[in-house]
Image (spheres, rainbow, N blue to C red):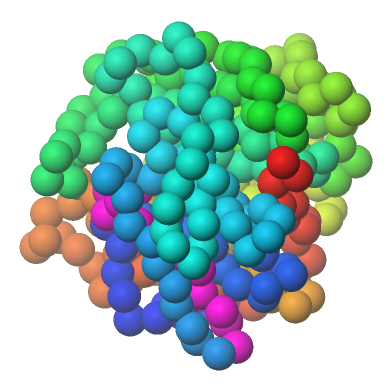
């Protein structure tokens, strides 16, 4: 695959790519840069919104508005004014946590996971010392329930095309889990190890394709692993950036793989040309459609 940067900009900690099919826009965030972005791939129009705290995800919702995960909760974002309003602020989160991984399931629920804050006031890297993260499900009526706790670095929320499986990872434990998933209730159960690949960086964010294979960005290894539904490795795809953080399929036919990358915690002397870039490459596989928040 021939990855190229989508634009000249570089992002400290690019994350959470989401393809907005209705608007034909790529959405993503710079967690440490405290900014969210919407890029129209045809016109090259770039919109951006800035926040007072790290922002870990942006997804579309009705009325030209968005939902963002920032600070310790989920908030509605007015695209015109940049104003945010509370949607769900989970109780019980340790005071040192921040939001991290967040995705919308195929039924329109917003899943949001936290971790111990690892970003200093100046955007610098703070080591993660405790597994204090939690996983929450925010339904379309804004009700919220806790699904997991004791998470180190939350990542890789995706669902299988037949809506019977949910995937979730803890980068600190270097493991990707799979759950049985009930699409009607949103309940996840029977957690077990899906993949725990050694010697190929650490599992970060993922994308799902229509064949039921999971594409997992490998932080620190400059590659993406495509896992078959049984957890075996189908292929390893090189990425021209050391720290790919997540990926998603987009474009009119959903055959373009977009990859967010980062240079967070990387000395300037060690940064490569594409570290921190939003990358894209054509594929021969169609990706799963992204769902907007239904609330």
Give the percent coordinates (x, y) of residue 16: 51, 51
Can residue 237 be seen from the camera position used here? yes
Instruction: Name the one closer to the observer, 146 or 152.
Output: 146
Q: From what the image shows, is residue 251 above or below residue 111?
A: below
> In terms of image quadrants, where is residue 124?
top left
- Residue at image position (28%, 28%) is 117
> In terms of image quadrants, where is residue 190?
top right
Q: Name the residue at the bottom extreme.
A: 43
Left/right placement of residue 161 relative to residue 43 reads right
The C terminus sits in image quarter: top right
- Residue at image position (50%, 35%) is 86
Instruction: Name the one closer to the observer, 226 or 260.
Output: 260
- Residue at image position (28%, 19%) is 96
Whether residue 221 appears in magenta in the rendering, the answer is: no
Instruction: Name the one closer to the observer, 245 or 74.
Output: 74
Q: From what the image shows, is residue 49 above or below residue 273?
A: above
Whether residue 39 appears in magenta in the rendering, the answer is: yes
Give the percent coordinates (x, y) of residue 1: 58, 74
Q: From what the image shows, is residue 20 above or below residue 7?
A: above
Q: From what the image shows, is residue 75 above or below residue 167?
A: below
Residue range in magenta is 31-42
- Residue at image position (30%, 16%) is 95
Can residue 172 be seen from the camera position used here? no
Left/right placement of residue 230 relative to residue 33 reads right
Give the percent coordinates (x, y) of residue 108: 76, 42
> In terms of image quadrants, where is residue 9?
bottom left
């Amino acid at each position: 695959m021939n990855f190229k940067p989508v634009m000249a900009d570089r992002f400290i900690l690019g994350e959470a790519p989401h393809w907005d099919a209705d608007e034909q826009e790529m959405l993503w965030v710079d967690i440490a840069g405290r900014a969210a972005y919407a890029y129209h791939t045809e016109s090259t129009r770039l919109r951006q919104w800035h926040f007072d705290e790290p922002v870990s995800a942006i997804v579309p919702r009705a009325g030209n508005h968005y939902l963002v995960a920032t600070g310790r909760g989920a908030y509605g974002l007015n695209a015109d004014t940049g104003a945010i309003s509370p949607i769900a602020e989970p109780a019980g989160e340790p005071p040192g946590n921040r939001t991290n991984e967040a995705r919308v399931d195929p039924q329109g629920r917003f899943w949001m996971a936290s971790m111990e804050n690892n970003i200093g006031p100046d955007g610098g890297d703070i080591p993660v010392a405790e597994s204090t993260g939690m996983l929450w499900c925010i339904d379309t009526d804004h009700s919220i329930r806790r699904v997991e706790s004791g998470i180190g670095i939350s990542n890789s929320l995706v669902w299988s095309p037949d809506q019977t499986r949910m995937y979730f990872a803890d980068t600190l434990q270097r493991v990707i889990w799979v759950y049985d998933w009930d699409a009607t209730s949103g309940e996840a159960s029977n957690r077990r190890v899906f993949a725990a690949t050694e010697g190929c960086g650490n599992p970060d964010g993922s994308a799902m394709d229509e064949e039921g294979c999971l594409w997992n960005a490998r932080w620190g290894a400059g590659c993406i692993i495509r896992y078959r539904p049984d957890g075996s490795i189908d292929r390893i795809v090189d990425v021209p950036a050391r720290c790919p953080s997540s990926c998603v399929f987009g474009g009119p036919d959903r055959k373009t793989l977009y990859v967010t990358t980062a240079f967070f915690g990387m000395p300037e002397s060690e940064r490569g040309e594409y570290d921190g870039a939003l990358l894209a490459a054509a594929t021969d596989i169609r990706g799963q459609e992204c769902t907007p928040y239904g609330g």
